Amino acid sequence: MGERLRQTGLVVAGGMIGSMLRFLAAQDPGDVPWEVLGINLVGAVAAGWLVGRISHHSHRARWLVPFAVVGVTGALTTFSGLVVDVLSLVDAERWGETAIYAGASLLCGPVAAASGLHLGGRE
């Protein structure tokens, strides 16, 4: 129970930081939330990079997964935020922007994470 509680505390602490960063970065997303897309892609690169780095130093950096990967980048890059943004565009009947935003998010997100993983895995 002690280790589980410690990891939960790390996720909460990281989540507070990630949520604050997302809030500060996306103050006024405008008609199409391009800033949110940018935040999600930067967060995906960061998460991939961290996982790549941690895999090489797992014995020293076990606390980084719950804190930085799950907490910080998890709160910074939220799938629920993406869904709300897409639904808002659909509700406004902005079909072109909906397709571009959703497509860019779903295609570029995994590419960004894989790029971060590749960069983080380099020694």
Image (spheres, grey):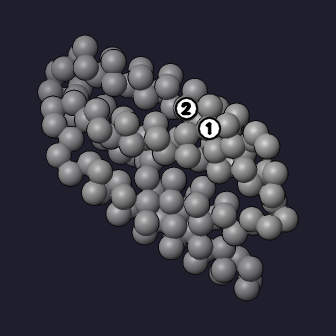
Q: Quadrant of residue 40?
A: top left
> Quarter holding the C terminus?
top right
> Judging from the image, what secondary structure is the residue with disc 1 in?
helix
Vertical arrangement, residue 54 with respect to residue 63, above or below: above
* Residue that appears at 33% across and 24% down: 101
- Amino acid bearing label 1: Gly
Label 1 crowd bin: few (<14), some (14–19), many (20+), radius 10 Å: many
Residue 90 lies, in percent from the top left, at 23, 26
Residue 12 lies, in percent from the top left, at 51, 72
Label 2 crowd bin: few (<14), some (14–19), many (20+), radius 10 Å: many
Q: Quadrant of residue 1?
A: bottom right
Q: Is residue 4 visible?
A: yes
Name the disc covering residue 116, or none.
Answer: 1
Most foreground residue, 48 or 100? 48
Vertical arrangement, residue 22 with respect to residue 95, above or below: below
Side (left or right) of 10 relative to 15 = right
Most foreground residue, 6 or 25? 25
Side (left or right) of 27 relative to 100 = left
Q: Is residue 79 visible?
A: no
The residue identified by callout 2 is 112
* Residue that appears at 66% across and 73% down: 7
Name the disc covering residue 28, or none.
Answer: none
* Residue that appears at 47% across and 65% down: 15
* Residue that appears at 57% across and 27% down: 111
> Judging from the image, what secondary structure is the residue with disc 2 in?
helix
- Amino acid bearing label 2: Ala
Residue 53 lies, in percent from the top left, at 72, 50
Residue 48 lies, in percent from the top left, at 63, 42
Side (left or right) of 68 relative to 43 = right
Q: Are marks 2 and 1 in contact (CB under 8 Å)?
A: yes
Most foreground residue, 87 or 6? 6
